[in-house]
Image (cartoon, rainbow, N blue to C red):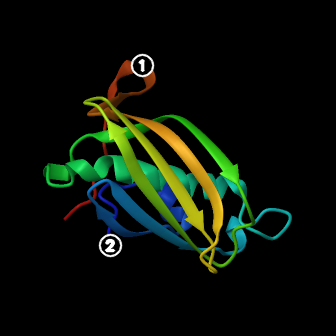
Amino acid sequence: MKFPVHIPFVQQLGFELVRIDEGEAELRVDIRELHLNSWEVAHGGVLMTLLDVAMAHAARSVHRDQPGFGPGVVTVEMKTSFMRPGEGALRAVGRLLHRSTTMAFCDGSVYGEDGRLCAHSTGTFKYLKALPGKGRSLKALQRTEG
């Protein structure tokens, strides 16, 4: 399945969007050498990015019937706990717990190849139609074609 927005960093990491439903999103990634830390397991930053993207897509899932998936989201805050090393094929599930017109409250989990929990996160996201950039000019959300 194609991501609804163009995210070069996520594309570079090789993340795949498996599904996006009402209030939930699932991603996967096959851990490769570029994802590793000095212990030769998935770097915590890879797990946190996987969680961030899964939760953000869960937050956006409620707008999936709108053109371009409706507004974008930005992360306001995120807390992550690591339980065990991530190795092999990882699966992340993000869930929308509550939302208002401007904010989304989510949680997410990353599971290892064996189905065991590797990391868990909670996050707060803000819905935005545009993002102020340098010089306060507005930057449009880069949507995926077709």
Residue 65 in percent (x, y) is at 14, 54
Image mark for residue 135: 1
Q: Which residue is mark 2?
A: 1
Disc 2 marks which amino acid? Met
The residue depicted at 60 percent of the width and 53 percent of the height is 120
Residue 39 in percent (x, y) is at 85, 66
Depth check: give the residue in front, 94 or 49. Answer: 94
How many numbered marks appear? 2
Query: Who comes first in sequence, dot 2 or dot 1?
Result: 2
Front tag of 2 and 1: 2
Depth check: give the residue in front, 21 or 52. Answer: 21
Depth check: give the residue in front, 14 or 98. Answer: 98
Quarter the C terminus occupies: bottom left
Q: Circle 2: is it few (<14), some (14-19), or many (20+) Cα within 10 Å?
A: few
Image mark for residue 36: none
76 lies above or below 34: above
Q: Secondary structure at mark 1?
A: helix
Outermost residue to the top = 135
Quarter the N terminus occupies: bottom left
Residue 93 placement, left or right of 30: left
What is the distance, in whole Å, between disc 2 and disc 1 at their CAs?
Answer: 36 Å
The residue depicted at 62 percent of the width and 79 percent of the height is 113
Residue 109 placement, left or right of 36: left
